[in-house]
Amino acid sequence: MAILTENRLRLSIIVRKALTLKNFTPNEIIQLYDQHTKATGQIFEPEAIDRVHWWTDGQPCLVNAIARECIEKQLKNDFSKPITAEMVELAVQTIILRRDVHIDSLLERLNEKRVRKIIEPVILGFAEDIDYMSDDSTYCLNLGLIKIEDDQISPGNRTYGEVFIRTLSYNTQFALQSKIQPSWALADRLDMNSLLKTFQQFWRENSEIWIEKYDYKEAAPHLVLQVLLQRVINGGGDILREYASGRKRFDLCVLYAEKKYPLELKLKYSAKTEPEGLEQLGSYMEIMGAREGWLIIFDRNKDTSWENKLYWKTVDTIHGTIHVVGC
């Protein structure tokens, strides 16, 4: 299979447009890109191919789109230069922000009730509550919005997972621009404590308003907080999102000024939420190589007063310091 230019094989056009082709394996991605290398002499560095698979899980449209973005847009068809991992990262972010046709057509489905019934618990980490055999699950699976691995449901690939969050909170990004300024991003670090303390007060004053703006009402706290984080680091950092499917949590790691800030978002569902969160976040901190983390717990019980919902405490664990942030 060839890729990239319009006058190449017709099959490349099919790959661009099809939404349900079987995903490529890592070896098939290598074979696909190797055809371009043989035709032009331009190579894809091994690290670049690894990043393509990491972001796409072999989704054909994305595999093709990333290559075209690197070669045609970034390098202007200069085949003398290799495709690097850095180029792939830039291409992915461009595709996400541009919302290519195939992504846009898939994301229109997020507004459908049957899709929301599946995607919302995936965002919240409650995928274990989903009936894998239901028509709704099958529908989302066939669209490629989700995948099932080791009896766990997660986004179809990392690119889709990133776009889920950005798409569902798209309007909020603009609305928050005038309300919260990114003053916590310092030259050498991110003042995460001040940021989250400000968010606590903001959430107390505005949560009812913002929740009503979302069809995904249960996921609204997660979405609004991530909009704030994205706005603060825009142009100077990145966010790694881990859909902790079936573990009642959503893991984030903010990367800024060569430092890592791991966060875990949880809905309070019982007295076990905090101790479970401390243990889970500690394990995540160890994976990320960080000694400080933030556990954000959203209490959606309307009978609980804000005085009891909002709290801050710092816990020393074997994994490092964890700040527990009640919202």
Image (cartoon, grey):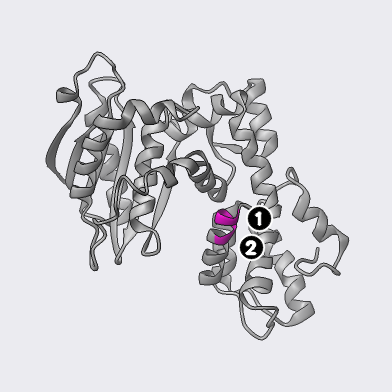
Rendered location of residue 286, percent (x, y): 28, 51
* Disc 2 target residue: 66
Q: Residue at x 25, y 24 (%)?
A: 272
* Disc 1 target residue: 62
Query: Of residues 160 and 59, which is closer to you in this image?
Result: 160
Left or right position of 64 against 210: right
276 lies above or below 75: above
Q: Does residue 248 appear anywhere in the picture?
A: no
Q: Main secondary structure of the magenta part?
A: helix
Q: Residue at x 65, y 55 (%)?
A: 62
Dot 1 falls on a residue whose secondary structure is helix
Q: Amino acid at mark 2?
A: Ile
Extreme top residue here? 303
Rendered location of residue 236, percent (x, y): 36, 64
State which region is magenta: 94-98
Is 296 magenta? The answer is: no
Query: Of residues 183 and 191, which is closer to you in this image?
Result: 183
Dot 2 falls on a residue whose secondary structure is helix
